[in-house]
Amino acid sequence: MDLYGFEVEVVFLIHNDEVLAYAWHYDERRALKHLKKIMEYHNLKGKIKKSIEFEKWLKEEVDKVVMKGAKSTLPDFEYQNRFVYENIIEIPRGKITTYAQIARISSVKYIEMLKALMRNPFQILIPCHRLLTK
């Protein structure tokens, strides 16, 4: 998949025709390995697949969120530490906050917040890049 000039391999986790998570990397094996870690952390089940259709969906979502500043939405699923993701989504485009602030408003321990970020099921769409250490 060409993502703004970067060629990445994307694998999706699909359940009932809905994307529950995805992972990307320059190497498909590494993308798959990361997706499996996301699945384990969130106890997700579904079919892992590559899909031109879902790649188009992802490109459209990235355009809306990154380029136009729209807020992403999570599927109706109880992701572990979901409040962390929901609070990060609320950070407006062009603004930043700290890891500590997100942990505090999400009512989770700092280390749990970091684990959630490492297993972000929607990289870029849940804009972890808007977080700073201090």
Image (spheres, rainbow, N blue to C red):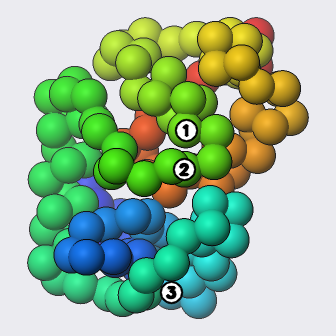
Q: Which residue is mark 1?
A: 82
Badge 2: residue crowd in 10 Å (few <14, some 14–19, many ≥20): many
State the residue position of label 2.
79
Residue 95: percent from left, percent from top: 43, 10
Q: Is residue 31 visible?
A: no
Q: Is residue 1 above or below residue 62?
A: below
Which one is earlier in the sequence, the residue at label 1 or at label 3?
A: 3
x and y percentages locating residue 93 in the rendered image: 32, 18
Q: Amino acid at mark 2?
A: Tyr
Within 10 Å of disc 3 (Cα), the crowding (few <14, some 14-19, many 20+) is: some
Query: Relative to 121, is 126 above or below?
Result: above
Residue depicted at 76% across the width and 25% down the height: 108
**For this view, does 86 lie left or right of residue 110?**
left
Picture mark count: 3
Of labels 3 and 2, the one closer to you: 2
Of label 3 and label 2, which has the lower sequence position? 3
> In front here: 78 or 97?
78
Q: Are marks 1 and 2 in contact (CB under 8 Å)?
A: yes
Q: Picture coordinates of residue 44 (x, y %)? A: 54, 70
Residue at position x 25%, y 68% in the image: 18
Q: Mark yes or no: residue 106 visible.
A: yes
Residue at x-position 46% and y-position 29%: 86
Q: In the picture, residue 1 is in which quadrant?
A: bottom left
Q: Percent x, y for residue 39?
A: 60, 71
Drawn side of residue 111 relative to residue 122, left or right: right
Residue wearing tag 3 = 28
